[in-house]
Image (cartoon, rainbow, N blue to C red):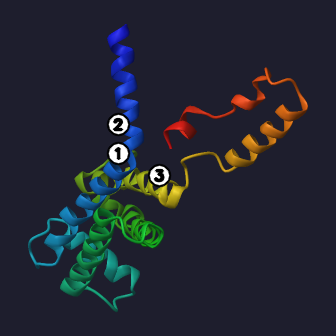
Amino acid sequence: MRIYGQVVRFLEGLGAKFGVTALRTAIGIIFLWFGVPKLFPGMSPAEPLASETVGRLTFGVIEGTTAAVLTGALETVIGLLLVSGKLPALTVMVLLGHMAGTFTPLFLFPQETWESLCIGTLEGQYILKNLVIVAGALVIIGHSTGRGRRSPAGPRVRADAARAGEARAPSTAASSSVSASDRAG
């Protein structure tokens, strides 16, 4: 049981130190992996569905190869920004907008994305995995520029506790309100 605890503490420390960066980089690599092939017509197996979707969403203004290449360019830019860590707030906003578009084939083309109720085709499953990307993007934005490292009320709570401690005997527990995540962050 002692080894289990040591492994858990090690993994918690690793996650606290590198977890968000690893998540951001992994999602960025996925965007590059799916985006770059769309820049070269005929290279991406997702090209037909992407082209159809963009064509339908733009009422036919952008379709075919142009739609696939523009989608690939957007995905590539998102991927590069995620991997670099630059402009996290803007990147996540663009990513979430893009994700909204990627879910539309589930409704626009149900014959291509669903075999039956709650059973997705390969394309449908490919789209549904984006739920994990959306959740990851929310974690990334929540931890960008210091957010998420402590509760929003963290510093105020400690200051209030310190003032309360001045009025009470020094042995009160109020002054020990620093959480493990505050010590790590």
Please tell me which residue lies in front, 28 or 22: 22
Residue beneath the point at 18% across and 84% down: 65
What number is the disc on residue 14? 2
Res 63 quadrant in image: bottom left
Real-space CA distance between mark 2 and mark 1, rounded to the nearest whole angstrom: 6 Å
Q: Is mark 1 on a helix, strand or loop?
A: helix
Whether pointer 2 and pointer 1 mark residues with C-beta atoms closer than 8 Å, the reply is yes
CB within 8 Å, label 3 to label 2: no
Residue occupying image coordinates x 41% and y 70% = 91
For marks 3 and 1, give the CA distance.
Answer: 13 Å
Residue type at the position of mark 1: Phe
Percent coordinates x, y for residue 8 in the rendering: 38, 23
Give the labeled residue for mark 3: 139
> What amino acid type is highlighted by mark number 2?
Leu
Using the image as rendered, state which of residue 33 and residue 19 is in the foreground: 19
Q: From this view, report whether residue 37 is shown above or below residue 25.
A: below
Vertical side of 125 occupied by 100: above or below: below
**Image spot of residue 108 (x, y percent):** 39, 69
Tell me the crowding category of disc 2: few under 14, some 14 to 19, or many 20 or more residues within 10 angstroms, Cα based: few
- So how many labels did they put on this image? 3
Q: Name the residue under label 1.
A: 18
